[in-house]
Every structure is written in C-alpha cells, then in structure tokens.
Image (cartoon, rainbow, N blue to C red):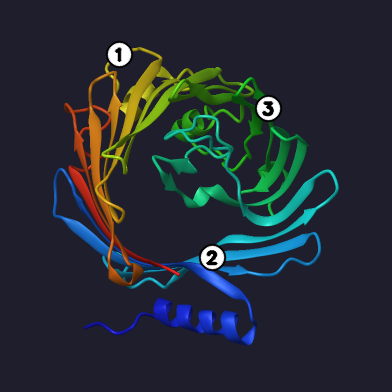
Amino acid sequence: MRQVSILITLFLLLTVLATQALAIEAGGEAEVLYSGVLPEEGDFEDEIVDRIDLELFLPPLGNTEFSYAFQISKPLQGLLANEDAVYFPKKLYLKHKFEKMRLTLGRQPVSWSFGSLLNPVDYTLGSVALDEEHNSKYTDAVAVYIPLNWNSSLSLVASYPDGFTSKEDQQKWGARARFGVKGYDLTLNYVREAELFEATGAVLDEIVGSIPRERLGFAFKGDIKNIGVYGAYGHYFGEGIKSSDSYLLGADYSFTNNYNTKITFQLEFLGVELKFLEPQLRKELLKMKSDDQRIDFLVGNINYPLNDFSALSLMTMVSLDEGSLFLTPGFLTTLASNLDLELSATFFGGKDGALFAPGAVMPKAVIAVSLRYPF
C-alpha cells in the first residue's frame, strides 16, 4: 500500500486551516485518475494522477467578493511520475457590484457557452467541449458585466493569456451582447485574439500567419414545443488572410420513462470552412482527399440513468467527409461514503488517413477510471 501522497496531506492541512483557524468554508473535490492509451503501433501506455480542486468561500465585504480556487495535480505513475506537483490557479479575483454593472479583476473563468457540445463562437475556442472543461477557460482578465434588463446584458472582457505582465500586443479582448426575443436567447459577440506567436521559417509562417485574429459570432437558443433547439454562426477574419465561416445547428430532447427515468438526447451538426489554410497544407494537417474547403461533423450524446445513483452515457463524433469517428461509452455511479466512480473508454475508427483513424495522431483506444470525492 503506497504512502499518502503530498496532495492528500496538503488538502488536509488547507482544510484544517480554512475551517478552524481562519473560520473560512472550503469545498472542492479530490480525485485519483487512471488512464491508458493503446496506440496503433507500440506498447500500451498508462498513468495515474492525483488531483485536488479546492475553493475557499469567503464572506463578502459589502458589495465586494473575493474568490480563490486552485487545482494541484501530481502524476504517480507514467512518463511524468518523477515530475513535481503542478499548481494551477482557477480563480483568484475580486468582484465588485456597482449600481449598474459588475467588475471582476483577476484570474477567472471566461466562457460564452450556451449548452452545446461544441462551441465555434466561444471566447476561447475549445475551453468547454464535449461536456469537458479545460484549463484554457481560466485566464487573467478584466471583465465588465452590464445588465440591461431581466433578459438582456452586455459583457466586456480584456484578458492576458500570458499573465497581466504581458505586452500590449499579447492582450486579447472581446464583447458580447445578449438579448431575449420572443422566448429565444440571442447573443452576438466579437473577439480579437492576442499576438502570441512569432513565425520563424516558411512552414511556420504559413501555419501561424494563417490563423484568424478576429471573429464575429452569433448564437441562438430556444424551444420548439418540447424540443430544445440552438445554433451558432462564426465568421473568422484578419489582416492578410482569407476569411472563413463555421455553422452549428443542434437539438436536445428528454423524456421520462417508467415515471422516474429521464433519458436525454443531444445531436449537433458542425460545419467548418478552412479557407484560411492553403489547400496543400490543409490536406497534410487533416488528411483530406479532396479540395473541398469545408469539413463537416455530426456529434451526438445520450444519457440514460439506471437509478438515482448510476447512469450510462454514449457520445460519438463523426466526420461526414470520410466517415471516420470516435465512440465514447461511459458509466458513472455513486458508491458508499459519497465516492463517485466513473468508467469510460474512447474507440477510434476509420480508413487509413482519415481524421479519426488510428495512426500517427489518433490511437486505437483510450480508457479512463476516475474515483472522485466531493467535499
């Protein structure tokens, strides 16, 4: 039996200090994650990671709130087992409520999600994808939220992906307007990316120089009878590159079976134009076999509760251009002592050279076993 890890010890010390000495409430989650990758060629590789998410809940001082949350992870087995524990601050900000607006300053989550599995018009693309939250959602930023009425608002964000000490050209900023119109939630946003890269060399110039620095986004969400519908349109552009567009259309539906089992379905279509990449470069990156300037995806998710404590899920993503896909079945259950056990596996398939086909980029399969304790 291995010794108690440094993460568990740190968690206990922080909990004692926060709840007793400082009289501050604390909450979060402790997790042990085992994952393994089966490549197309080579040996099976696996790792075990300890992870703790901790958030301190401080009483507000008038109209000012302070939030602090962080994650510490430590690989216990695998290629990075000898590396030090990694500290990642998720929240470290001050929020002040003025009479007509809210100002948030510091490390904070920034995401313009609207319930989709994929979001082509988020503030940071890919920060929330396929029901998973990624660290790119958390950034050093100054954010202003202005409520216009009960269902309309304006959000302004200036963020610094490399920290507040970044140069002026490394600042990223955006604006988002949200309105409620006849039962539909409509949003319009604009984002200007930071200049984080300096191209050196012909190939790098071609790749980095082609990335759009600006984008406009529109999204809607509402209901048609008992079916939820939503969609988005993104337009990407910038100086010296060709503009491109993306299109998202989705629907979600749920119904109750046997009086207490709520089954949910979610299906999305995403089309992305790739005009900002040269045809030959696009072929090399995406293994496309035609000169079509567009790639289309179909994404689906099903959640089936077995009882009050367990649920099955199935997620898939299919490239409609060449039929490659990945399939992710999952099982989540709550054990004794409030422990959550999650089992999942992802299988990749497709013809040689297809986007999701096993090969140099995609493995044959990935498995994951997670044991979490929320507190």
Mark number displayed over residue 290? 1
> Residue reaching furthest top?
291
Q: Earlier in the sequence, mark 3 or mark 2?
A: 2
In contact (CB < 8 Å): disc 1 and disc 2: no
What element does badge 2 sit on?
Answer: strand
State how far apart marks 3 and 1 are (Cα).
41 Å
Give the percent coordinates (x, y) of residue 331.
24, 50
- Which residue corresponds to the image point at 70% horizontal and 42% vertical from the top-left? 157
Q: Nearer the viewer, mark 3 or mark 1?
A: 3
Q: Who is closer to the viewer here, 135 or 31?
A: 31
- Which residue corresponds to the image point at 55% horizontal and 40% vertical from the top-left? 124
The correct choice, above or below, for 365 with respect to 69 in the image is above
Give the percent coordinates (x, y) of residue 8.
40, 78
Location of mark 3 (residue): 179
In contact (CB < 8 Å): disc 3 and disc 1: no
Q: Quadrant of residue 92?
A: bottom right
Q: Who is closer to the viewer here, 27 or 365?
A: 27
Question: Which class describes the residues within 10 Å of circle 3: few (<14), some (14-19), or many (20+)?
Answer: some
- Which residue corresponds to the image point at 21% horizontal and 33% vertical from the top-left? 357
State how far apart marks 3 and 2 are (Cα).
33 Å
Mark number displayed over residue 70? 2
Q: What's under tag 2, amino acid-wise?
A: Phe
